[in-house]
Image (spheres, helix red, strand yellow):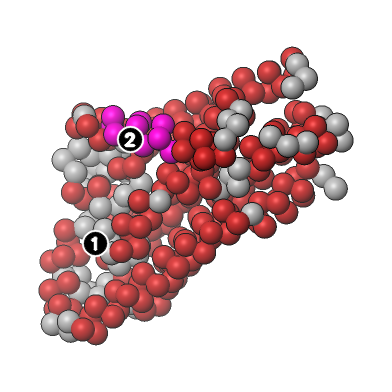
Amino acid sequence: MSYLKVDFYRLIRDKKVILVVLVMLAIAIIDPISVTRHFDQYPGSVKTIGLNPFQFWMLMNSVSWGNNLYHQIFWIMSVLLTGLIYHEDKNTSMYTYQIIRKSRIQYIVSKFVSTGVLSFAILFAALEINVVMTYTLFPDTTQMTEYYQHIIPQEGSFVYQAFLSNPMKEVQVYTFLNALAVTIFVIFSLCLSMLFHFKNRYVALLVPVIILYGITYIFDSFPPLFAYNIRMILQPMAVSAMTHIIEWENVFFVFGGWMVLNLVMISIILVKSRDRYE
């Protein structure tokens, strides 16, 4: 059996990955249902808030519990989706058993490919399920209240033209970017595990989370950096509320920067794995 098949099989059966799937599905399905319950209890708010689904998909609806939970677990999820498979291999005889079957390079590449593909698929599918649920429960896309006007992206922002063409295009842009971002940070977490070979599983879980939280804190602390803060870029409300306009140049620079960082770390890992037998 190839490395990829083994890695995919291990990941989809891993309890940490399954936990992320279950939490994301719960958010995707229950969050829009809970919004409908709000309107059942307070029917008068329909006139002021409206029932346009564009307002209530999880990534946009910043006041919902689903949105808050998603952002709270964002970094933790990026580590859990690695399954800590490499960490478990490295600290047992499984690592030696795996690499002698073919090669260390193939083993490492397989880890990155399987983890990245599965992470993207999980996040993209869960976010799309949320979009389908929301637009099914709130089918009236024509109602535009004053509240709706406040969430329209600013002119010049990277999703403004997509919104003008069709609000659903903006929804899909953010769905793709969020899934891609999680994938990038999953790869980042895996790179750290391969570079530093953490002996303790809790250290392997916490170190990437602490580093990512720390980087976000720096960007959150300096307003001139807001347009380059990936957590801001991933939130639809940011392009309507922020004074700093986020343009496509910012998006490409930030995502490109993280990808380059990952590629540099992957290159170091591959060079090290080729130079010596660990």
Q: Can residue 140 be seen in this view?
A: no
Estimate the spatial distance between the alpha carbons at disc 2 and disc 1, rounded to whole Å.
21 Å
The C terminus lies in quadrant:
top right
Q: Is mark 2 on a helix, strand or loop?
A: helix
- Foreground: 58 or 167? 58
Relative to residue 187, is residue 145 drawn left or right?
left
Instruction: Locate residue 254 relative to residue 22 in the image: left or right.
Output: left
In the rendering, which numbered label is found on residue 63? Answer: 1
Disc 2 residue type (three-letter)? Thr
- The residue carrying pointer 2 sits among few (fewer than 14), some (14 to 19) or many (20 or more) residues within 10 Å by Cα, namely some
x then y, percent, for residue 188: 52, 34
Which residue bears the numbered disc 2? 216
Kindly tell me whether residue 91 is visible in this rendering: yes
Give coordinates of residue 265: x percent, y percent.
57, 24
Mark 1 nearby-residue class (10 Å; few <14, some 14–19, many ≥20): few
Q: Magenta includes 11?
A: no
Residue 125 position, x and y percent, is 53, 61
Number of disc labels:
2
Q: Which residue is drawn at 73% across and 54% down?
A: 9
Q: In which quarter of the image is residue 55?
A: bottom left
Residue at point 56% right, 22% down? 264
Residue 217 lies within the magenta run: yes
In the image, the segment drawn in magenta is 208-219
Label 1, secondary structure: give it.
loop
- Main secondary structure of the magenta stretch: helix
Image: 44 above or below 144: below
Going by the numbered disc 1, the residue's amino acid type is Val
Q: Quadrant of residue 94?
A: top right
